[in-house]
Image (cartoon, rainbow, N blue to C red):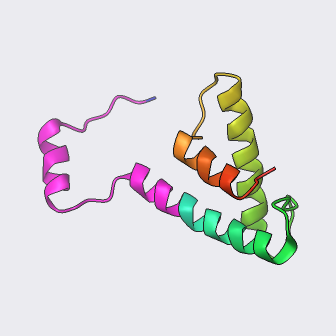
Amino acid sequence: NKPSRMTADRAQLLDDIDFEWRHERNDVLWHRQYEVLKAFKARTGHCRVPLKFEENQALGYWVKKQRDMYARMKANKKSSMTGERLQLLEAISFD
């Protein structure tokens, strides 16, 4: 990781103009894919999206990443899986 040149003053200036920090953007994108997965499940009855799903390859890769992040979290390794995300996935019987 490179050292950041971001100062508290710069961060405040960005906050003052409602700058959308990357973390928030990632969360929005995650929820968007989650909604696509819910629609897939409504159509198919399951969440087992093929990795190379022709209809939506991005969804296949996203589902694989969620499974990987879940496994990393369970192994106490760095993971983007949060408690909220886990609850949402479990709510739709993500398997």
Instruction: Give the residues drawn in magenta, as a range.
Output: 2-29
Residue 10 position, x and y percent, is 16, 45
Q: Looking at this view, is 56 or 6 the one in front?
A: 56
Residue 12 position, x and y percent, is 14, 47
The residue at the point 48 percent across, 62 percent down is 28
Q: Is residue 54 visible?
A: no
Magenta: main secondary structure equals: helix
Q: Looking at this view, is 10 or 33 the one in front?
A: 33
Residue 52 position, x and y percent, is 87, 63
- Residue 77 is left or right of residue 47, and the answer is left
Question: Considering only vertical position in the picture, is 22 above or below 68?
Answer: below
Task: Please check the rendered image and state whether residue 20 is part of the magenta-colored stretch, yes or no.
Answer: yes
Q: Looking at this view, is 20 or 81 the one in front?
A: 81
Question: Considering only vertical position in the picture, is 70 above or below 37?
Answer: above
The residue at the point 11 percent across, 41 percent down is 9
Residue 81 position, x and y percent, is 59, 41
The residue at the point 13 percent across, 57 percent down is 16
Dividing the picture into quadrants, the one containing residue 5 is top left
Question: Considering only vertical position in the picture, is 68 above or below 32?
Answer: above
Q: Looking at this view, name the residue that lies furthest to the top.
A: 76
Dividing the picture into quadrants, the one containing residue 36 is bottom right
- Residue 77 is left or right of residue 9, and the answer is right
- Residue 32 is left or right of residue 40, and the answer is left
Question: Considering only vertical position in the picture, is 18 above or below 72?
Answer: below
The residue at the point 55 percent across, 62 percent down is 31
Q: Is residue 39 visible?
A: yes
Task: Please check the rendered image and state whether residue 15 is part of the magenta-colored stretch, yes or no.
Answer: yes
Q: How many marks?
A: 0
